Image (cartoon, grey):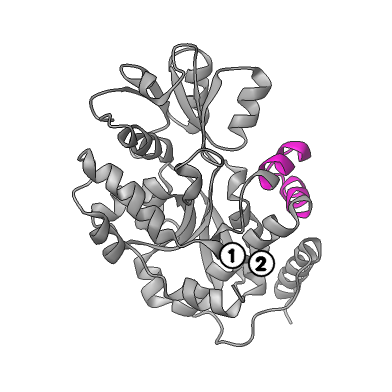
Amino acid sequence: MSRRRFLQQASALGAASLLGLSGESKAEPPPETTKIRLIHAPSICLAPQLLAGELLRLEGFTSVEYVDLTVNKLSSEVAKGRADLSMVATPEVIPVIDAGEPVVVLAGIHAGCYELFGNGNVRTIRDLKGKKIAISAWGSPEHAYVSSIIAYVGMDPRKDVDWVVGTSSADAMDMFVRGKGDAFLAFPPQPQDLRAMKTGHLIIDTAKDRPWSQYFCCVVVANRGFVDKHPVATKRALRAILKGADICAQEPARAARYLVEKNYESRYAVALDVVEGLPYRRWRDAHPEDTLRFHALRLHEVGMIKSTPKTIISQGTNWRFLNELKREMKV
């Protein structure tokens, strides 16, 4: 065994010990490629994907890379081939599928990471009419998600609100804090930071408020070319992320410690608050098709996408791997 391979296995086993896992999956062929790329996004609600960094090595991947975002549009990064797969916000991927980009939804993960904050002029969703909403980019997760929320109450996100576009999610939150935006859709640890700063107030908590709490906020998407060329690798990669979700659900303290030790979040209390507060076992209990249908209908009604929900689901999903893993993981 080469020194490099030995160190890779030692690192994987060390992380596996921290996470309480061991052993490579052997009941199926090895992955067609031993290299895989995921996205590094500044959100600890993506904990299953972050934990998967070591779990992927136990699945036979020797090169696991987290690529940095060039813009806060994770689905587009996957579609462009900069990453092979990633967790993304469900409403964000729907316009990408509608545009015919080579991206496919593989599974749902959890619900509820987003929280909509408003200033003193915004108390309800309808109060957003004529107000400024801070976002990181056109087509970003918060742009698509808030558009779906606005459409749900009968407003048109293209006409009834003003979008204030920043350069990043951190910049968008800063615009809200400085009063340049009336509302902002925050994801962990931003809600915790806003509460600590006593800035704004909560309008919607998608982990608790219906109908959003009933649907997946985050799904796993993959580049279609990667899936077609590497089906075994795709299944193994998805299994690693689903195992990461199970760790978050069953042992949130262990997952929070891992996030801190790997410097994804410096504050253990914040990491634990996020992991404990989100339903990470949702992938076992619900089907992501319902979520895609819900948000696609909202965006289709206001003309933000041309495709019907049925077309989005038929052209942009592949449930084969999820169904196999649910059987194998005894869902």
Q: Residue at x 49, y 19 (%)?
A: 176
Residue 41 to residue 186: above or below = below
Please give the residue where the numbered disc 2 appears in the rendered image.
55
Position in image of residue 49 (x %, y %): 59, 56
Q: Secondary structure at mark 1?
A: helix
Of tags 1 and 2, which is closer to the observer? 1
Q: Nearer the viewer, residue 181 or 55?
A: 181
Q: Position of residue 139 (x, y in %)?
A: 34, 39
Q: Earlier in the sequence, mark 1 or mark 2?
A: 2
Q: Residue at x 51, y 38 (%)?
A: 209
Q: Residues within 10 Å of mark 1 (few under 14, many from 20)?
A: many
- The residue under the point 18% across, 49% down is 306
Of the 4 image quadrants, the one containing the N terminus is: bottom right
Q: How many marks?
A: 2
Q: Secondary structure at mark 2?
A: helix
**Does residue 166 belong to the magenta stretch?**
no
Residue in front for this viewpoint, 245 or 233? 245
Q: Which segment is the magenta one?
A: 254-275
Q: Is residue 311 left or right of residue 251?
A: left
Give the quarter of the image for residue 227.
Answer: bottom left
Residue 259 seen by the camera: yes
Give me the disc on residue 242.
Answer: 1
Image: 143 above or below 39: above
- Res 217 visible: no
Residue type of the residue flagged with mark 1: Leu
As measured in the structure, the alpha-carbon distance from the residue carrying label 1 to the one carrying label 2 is 10 Å
Does the segment drawn in magenta span residue 266? Answer: yes
For the C terminus, which image quadrant?
bottom right
Q: Residue drawn 38% across and 46% down? A: 91
Left or right of 151, for residue 253: right
Looking at the rendered structure, the kind of residue marked 2 is Leu
| Residue 62, horizontal then vertical, whole percent | 62, 71
